[in-house]
Image (spheres, coloured by chain):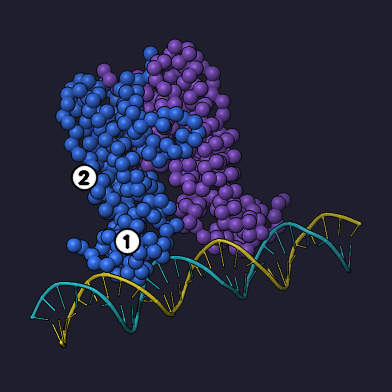
Chain colours: A blue, B purple, C cyan, D yellow
Amino acid sequence: MASTHVGTADAASRILQAAETLFAAKGYDAVSLNLIASSAAVSKANIFHHFRSKSDLYFEVLRNAAAASRVDVGNLPAQSDYHERLAAFARQHLRNYVNHPTRARLLVREFLDGTAQIGQLLTRDEFARNFDQLVNLLKQGQRSGQLRDSVDPDLVATLIIAANVFYFRARVTMRQIGAPIFDQTPDAYSDLITEIILRGIRT
Amino acid sequence: MASTHVGTADAASRILQAAETLFAAKGYDAVSLNLIASSAAVSKANIFHHFRSKSDLYFEVLRNAAAASRVDVGNLPAQSDYHERLAAFARQHLRNYVNHPTRARLLVREFLDGTAQIGQLLTRDEFARNFDQLVNLLKQGQRSGQLRDSVDPDLVATLIIAANVFYFRARVTMRQIGAPIFDQTPDAYSDLITEIILRGIRT
DNA sequence: GACGCAACTGACCGTCCGGTCGGTTTAACA
DNA sequence: TGTTAAACCGACCGGACGGTCAGTTGCGTC
């Protein structure tokens, strides 16, 4: 067995988990160490026993989030139909967000908003991996002749990733605006996105 | 002439402008009233003479940003070619962001991240206006027979807005990743986006 | 020139912040 | 059982925070 009298996990990981939740919900500045400590059932001093500083704890949280997200990319089935392959990628990409919302909030915020270089290095890595994978997929599709040569793969990759990021961050508010697509399941949403990008909307 | 000895504008608007810049750059929690005061060449106490509280000042800044953004929507030329009309909308939408980056940062952040209801009411309004305008444009296109009936206008509007928001917030970092499209001018970028959405990428 | 009032300030308040420190408990090992 | 080191805590620190207040200045009005 792991611990004897307190909590369910050891203090360090309890601190990390509480910090992840709080940082994801409120952002770095709005979260105090007192809050993290009480939320993790730990004295504030003990946080400094396990982590050098508040920013150190934050970067550790980011590092863990990036690492956890890394195992999610997974290999896509090597089908020959690029419609299916693109759809599968978009679905999986969006699933990674909605299935791990706190982690995703952390990474997306740091990526879009990040002023700290260290945080950007971590999340940039993450976005670059997805981006490159998608671009390569599109280039293969062009080589196979199923996708038009004249379109820039970077641009298409951006479109798909942007659509997913937007869905993840804005869906609650967009629902209130009265945009019923955001009631769709993530899978249905990314399928619709993929279909439009492939076929276009012109008659 | 307006003021006699200090600054160029009256204190209240100097405070508002300094607050807008700082809030846009660092976010609400990371900006202190001391910083705003010194940045506006005003005593901290004077901020409380003009505004009830820090959050009050922040919402005033948001309100101004939303109001300023409202005049930007402008009417689009009523052409019959929906390719051109869509392209014009996308271009104008993205221009509104890049030409007023601090304002746009404030609104986009509050829209995507906003936990405060008051902030959401302000920015939601803004996004809803753009969204509805774009959806109506697409519906007209469908009625005229130039756009496929089977696609959901909400979805297409989302795609365009998401692509623009992503460009605006992520372009610097995406450039570092090595995605050369983000070196394109905003106009060129939104033209490319529009073209893909209209024609699709399939051969 | 006295009045009234908005604009404005420096000094101050209580609170909470990130972080430190001295000391106690726990647990593995000799 | 004594030693050692990590885990942990309560109390504390200087400083910054948002906010208050008593008082001064500038100015239009009668």
Residue placed under numbered mark 2 in the picture: A71
Residue C20: x and y in percent read 35, 76
**Chain under numbered label 1:** A
Q: Is residue B158 visible?
A: yes
Do marks 2 and 1 share a subunit? Answer: yes
In which quadrant will I find the C terminus of chain A?
Answer: top left
B134 left or right of A15 in image = right
In this rendering, is residue A9 above or below A101? below
Q: Amino acid at mark 2?
A: Val
The residue where tag 1 is placed is A15
Name the spot of residue A160 as percent of width and height, x first: 32, 32
Residue B144 in the image: state x and y as whole percent.
47, 12
Residue for point 49% across, 26% down = B134
Query: Is A108 above or below relative to B193?
Result: below
* A154 or C25: nearer the viewer: C25
**Sequence-first tag of 2 and 1:** 1
